[in-house]
Image: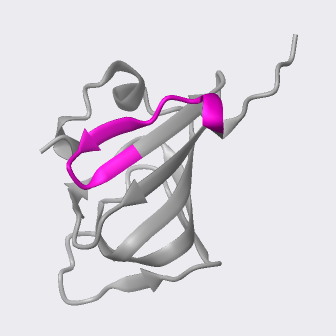
Amino acid sequence: MIEKISWSSVPVEQVNEKMKRQFIHGEKVMIAKMEFEDGFEVPWHSHHNEQVTEVFEGTLRFWFDDVEDKHLDILPGESIVIPENRRHRALMIGKVIEIDTFAPPRQDWIDGSDAYLRK
């Protein structure tokens, strides 16, 4: 049976003082709606999940492959596809609202073992 899901019924998780997220997932894909405060940094990491990020508000600045002197800014209405296992980090410029889609779902988010975000 297929059921509708309303974001208003999905619990909001306060991951840390500057990050809130909601997510839903099936067997093969996860979608996460997130809100970040200005200045929040996602540290260097990689994951076996392909990631698609779409920004709705603010600027999401990405760095890739441990290269600190070159970045890519994603603005409202823009998206990016990050291949699996690609090292990246991010900085939120202004309040950022965005949606990430992952395939397969992020098991570390489901089971709460995503310590790199909880600092």
Name the residue at the right extreme.
Answer: 1
Q: Nearer the viewer, residue 64 or 37?
A: 37
Q: Residue 64: horizontal and vertical position, in percent?
A: 31, 72
Query: Is residue 41 on the magenta stretch?
Result: no
| Residue drawn at x 49%, y 64% as measured from the top left | 97
- Quarter of the picture containing the C terminus is top left
Name the residue: 66% across, 24% down.
26
Q: Quadrant of residue 25?
A: top right
Tell me: residue 24, above or below residue 117: above
Q: Is residue 21 above or below residue 100?
A: above
Q: Which residues are magenta?
A: 8-20
Is residue 15 one of those drawn in magenta? yes
Q: Is residue 58 left or right of residue 111?
A: right
- Could you tell me residue 68's position as x and y percent? 18, 81
Furthest-top residue in this view: 1
Q: Residue furthest left?
A: 119
Q: Nearer the viewer, residue 49 or 109?
A: 109
Which x, y percent locates residue 104? Answer: 56, 34
Which residue does the image show at 45% across and 78% down from the upper left?
58
Q: Is residue 12 visible?
A: yes
Give the residue displayed 59% in from the left and 31% down from the top: 24
- Quadrant in which the N terminus appears: top right
The picture quadrant where one finds residue 90 is bottom left
Residue 104 in sight: no
Judge from the rendering whether residue 58 lies leftward or rightward of residue 65; answer left or right: right
The residue furthest front is: 8
Count of numbered circles on the image: 0
Task: Where is residue 84? Give x, y as percent.
Answer: 46, 50
Position above or below: 13 against 2: below
Question: Is 25 left or right of 66, judged from the image as shown?
Answer: right
Q: Looking at the image, which is closer to me, 81 or 2?
A: 2
